[in-house]
Image (tube, rainbow, N blue to C red):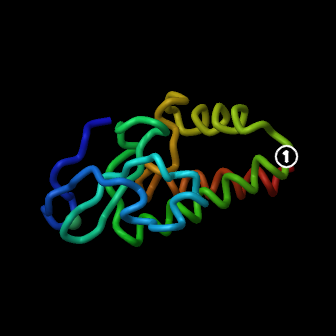
């Protein structure tokens, strides 16, 4: 994934910042105390990094897309936990369904349409089960 430098929403400058500067004391609870984020210095659009690296998970997200990514994560997590899948197996399933490599199948980097597709997949499979 290309490192974002200019915000796609507002054209502001994107900088790599410590997660702590965004999440404050919650960074520890979120397991992100040593992680960095890319953040637009103008409008606060942001995206996380692959754990332990400065490689962005995807493009920066504004608040609407961030909420969508959170909703998607909840649908996905409850899907695989309900089925007693391992986390690894769940991400393999996700990658296959999304026609992505396991390395790039990160909801934290998904766009709106990809998020919706995951939500639909998790719902449809639930009905079929
Ligand atoms: Zn911006």
* Image location (x, y in percent) of residue 42: 18, 69
Q: Give the residue pinned by disc 1.
A: 83
Quadrant position of residue 13:
bottom left
Ligand 1 is found in the corner quadrant, namely bottom left
- Please name the residue shown 56% across and 58% down the image: 28
Q: Does residue 18 appear to the left or right of 83 in the view shown?
A: left
- Please name the residue shown 69% across and 32% down the image: 88
Q: Does residue 102 appear to the left or right of 85 in the view shown?
A: left
Decide which of 21, 119 is in the foreground and name it: 21
* Image location (x, y in percent) of residue 54: 35, 38
How crowded pointer 1 is (Cα within 10 Å; few <14, some 14-19, many 20+) is rated as: few
**Mark 1 within 8 Å of ligand 1, using the beta carbon:** no
Q: Does residue 80 appear to the left or right of 105 in the view shown?
A: right
Q: Does residue 100 appear to the left or right of 127 in the view shown?
A: left
- Please name the residue shown 14% across and 63% down the image: 12
Q: How many marks?
A: 1
Please, what secondary structure does the residue beneath circle 1 have? loop
Decide which of 58, 14 is in the foreground and name it: 14
- Please name the residue shown 34% across and 59% down the image: 46
* Image location (x, y in percent) of residue 23: 45, 66
* Image location (x, y in percent) of residue 48: 41, 50
Pick the quarter of the image with the N terminus.
top left
């Amino acid at each position: 994934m290309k490192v974002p430098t200019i915000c796609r929403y507002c054209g502001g400058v994107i900088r790599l910042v410590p997660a702590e500067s965004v999440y404050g004391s919650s960074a520890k609870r979120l397991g992100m105390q040593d992680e960095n984020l890319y953040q637009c210095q103008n409008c606060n659009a942001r995206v996380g990094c692959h754990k332990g690296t400065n490689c962005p998970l995807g493009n920066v997200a504004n608040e609407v897309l961030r909420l969508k990514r959170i909703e998607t994560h909840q649908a996905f997590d409850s899907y695989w936990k309900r089925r007693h899948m391992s986390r690894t197996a769940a991400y393999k399933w996700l990658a296959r369904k999304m026609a992505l490599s396991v390395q790039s199948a990160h909801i934290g980097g998904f766009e709106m349409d990809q998020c919706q597709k995951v939500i639909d997949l998790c719902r449809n499979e639930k009905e079929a089960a």
